Image (cartoon, rainbow, N blue to C red):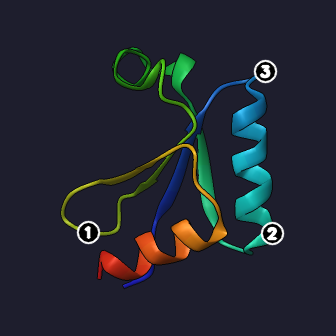
Amino acid sequence: MQNQLILLGTQGCHLCDDAEQLLQALNLPYQSLDIMDDEKLLQRYEISIPVLLDASNSGVNELFWPFNAEMISHWLTTQA
């Protein structure tokens, strides 16, 4: 099954920008969600962003910052 990656962040977050550039460099398709647009996401992730979610399985798996290309690859392969 293909991964359904979601990058949680917000505008003005330089770490979120770094995470987005990393995903683009890895050529991984993802969707960006701004936690400021959802009260539940804001409450859960306010001090944790950026967070990478994989919603392709029955649950949602989270990868919290800091992460790099190697960590993302390992995270994606260990979820299968």
**Which of disc 2 and disc 3 is earlier in sequence?**
3
* Real-space CA distance between mark 2 and mark 1, rounded to the nearest whole angstrom: 24 Å
Which quadrant: the N terminus? Answer: bottom left
- In the rendering, at what x and y percent does residue 38 appear? 45, 21
Q: On the image, numbered disc 1 is attached to which residue?
A: 57
Within 10 angstroms of label 3, few (less than 14), some, or many (20 or more) residues? few
Q: On the image, numbered disc 3 is attached to which residue?
A: 12
* Real-space CA distance between mark 3 and mark 1, rounded to the nearest whole angstrom: 30 Å
Location of residue 42 (image quadrant): top left
Question: Where is 50 relative to 7, above or below?
Answer: above
At 58% from the left edge and 37% from the top edge, which residue is drawn? Answer: 50
Location of residue 24 (image quadrant): bottom right
Circle 2: residue type: Ala
Q: On the image, numbered disc 2 is attached to which residue?
A: 25
**Which of disc 1 and disc 2 is earlier in sequence?**
2
**Which of disc 1 and disc 3 is earlier in sequence?**
3
Location of residue 66 (image quadrant): top right
Question: Where is 44 relative to 2, above or below?
Answer: above
Mark in the foreground, 3 or 1:
3
Circle 3: residue type: Gly
How many marks the image carries: the answer is: 3
* Real-space CA distance between mark 3 and mark 2, rounded to the nearest whole angstrom: 20 Å
Q: Which mark is residue 15?
A: none
Q: Dot 1 lies on which element? A: loop
Question: Where is 73 relative to 10, above or below?
Answer: below
Q: Which of the two residues, 37 or 47, is positioned nearer the viewer here?
A: 47
Q: Please give left or right for residue 11 compared with residue 44 in the image.
A: right
